[in-house]
Image (spheres, rainbow, N blue to C red):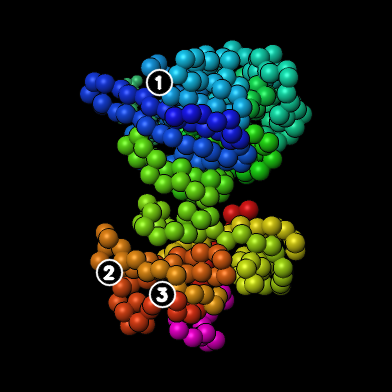
Amino acid sequence: MTNRPSDGLNIHLSQQYSGQSAFALNVDLTLPNTGVTALFGPSGSGKTTLLRCIAGLEKNQQGHIRLNNDQWQDHHTSLPTHRRPIGYVFQDAKLFPHLTAQQNLQFAIQRADKTQTVISSADVIRLMNIESILSQYPAQLSGGERQRVAIARALLIQPKLLLMDEPLAALDETLKQDILPYLERLCRSAKIPILYVSHSLDEVIRLADYMVVLAAGKVIEQGQTQALLGKLGTSFSRYQDASVIIAGTVNRQETEWGLSWLGFDGQAIAFKQAGEKIGDAVRLRIQSRDVSLSLSKQEDSSILNRLTVVIDEIENDPKDPSMTMVRLLAGQTPILAKITRLSAHHLNLKKGQIVIAQIKSVAVLS
Ligand SMILES: Nc1ncnc2c1ncn2[C@@H]1O[C@H](COP(=O)(O)OP(=O)(O)OP(=O)(O)O)[C@@H](O)[C@H]1O
């Protein structure tokens, strides 16, 4: 195989562990060179191993890794970890315990690639909101604060690629919710690609532009987050909380009722106000179990959101004979509705049919 220079992160890797686990990682991926790519998959599917290979931390890894035109590894050579321009954030913060937060950051600044500035110290401190804790030692910080310092430290290395391995996994639910907005701001503003390992569909939906799903060391699904979540027959469409993302612009507000409307693909959907203004770009999460279907607009229903949609595909749930998933298109935007097979039969639902999607509840993502 010939390797042509290309944009993005190009990973062609195999790594084998012998012994009891006998695990093999085999991936061939070209990932976007901006935005967040989530590595998703069950425990033991190889997500951490893949990150470690990219970082050059695994022995015996075979293949090539290239970011844009920089070759980190090929069949002949492999850059040692310290020469790969990466920032790495682990589950637990791994700060130096004998150094203050400020000194931990200073350590990164000294090691930084002086030829490029991804982010300034001032910006990172503001983005992670750590100004007031800089003089503290790690033991004096909460888990969430430690993790924010660890993320800042990884960025101040001025990496060309940021690797994040379940950065929220060690935090309780409240701390997770506290730190997610910082991560969101970072992910939206960073000019470098971020590879983000997570078990949590919620995190992935909020943060990732692109997704790669691993199972038993192989890539089983990949694509733009919005498109992949809106597909049938994937691991996501069979999730208990299968969801889609609707992205659009706020075009109406009724503050008296505490509601905003998101315009997308010629339609509008109401959601609970969450501080957004007219003209803001917002993404909403819609769970398939919150979508019901009717053949006509029921004006006497309490449900506000009634979208005119076309049935694109119908799939019976292979694990639950009572349920059916229906893929709908609102313009070009896919929406999934999880309904009973009996209802689908009674309504005689067919591909191409125009129906009304009634959406009960909508979560604001950003
Ligand atoms: N040093 C090692 N020696 C032998 N087997 C290993 C080694 N490191 C990882 N493995 C095996 O490789 C497989 C993949 O592990 P990995 O940690 O990459 O999975 P993961 O998807 O990140 O899992 P989790 O979500 O639980 O962190 C597992 O079966 C694991 O036991």
Query: Which residue is at a point 32% across and 24% down the rendered structure image?
Result: 16
**Ligand 1 placement by image quarter:** top left
Q: Quadrant of the N terminus?
A: top left
Name the kind of residue labelled 2 in the image: Ser
Marks 1/2: CA distance?
Answer: 46 Å
Sequence-first disc among 1 and 2: 1
- Mark 1 or 2: in front is 1
Marks 3/1: CA distance?
Answer: 47 Å
Residue 221's place in the image compared with 250, above or below, is above
Magenta part of the chain = 294-306
Q: Secondary structure at mark 1?
A: loop
Name the residue tied to disc 3: 351
Q: Quadrant of residue 233?
A: bottom left
Check disc 3: other Cα within 10 Å, few if <14, some if 14-19, many if 20+.
Answer: few
In this orientation, does residue 59 appear? Answer: yes
Check disc 1: other Cα within 10 Å, few if <14, some if 14-19, many if 20+.
Answer: some
The tag on residue 61 is: 1
Q: Does 14 sit left or right of 267 as displayed?
A: left
Sequence-first disc among 3 and 1: 1
Marks 2/3: CA distance?
Answer: 20 Å
The residue furthest left is 20
Q: Secondary structure at mark 3?
A: loop
Name the residue tied to disc 2: 322
Name the kind of residue labelled 3 in the image: Lys
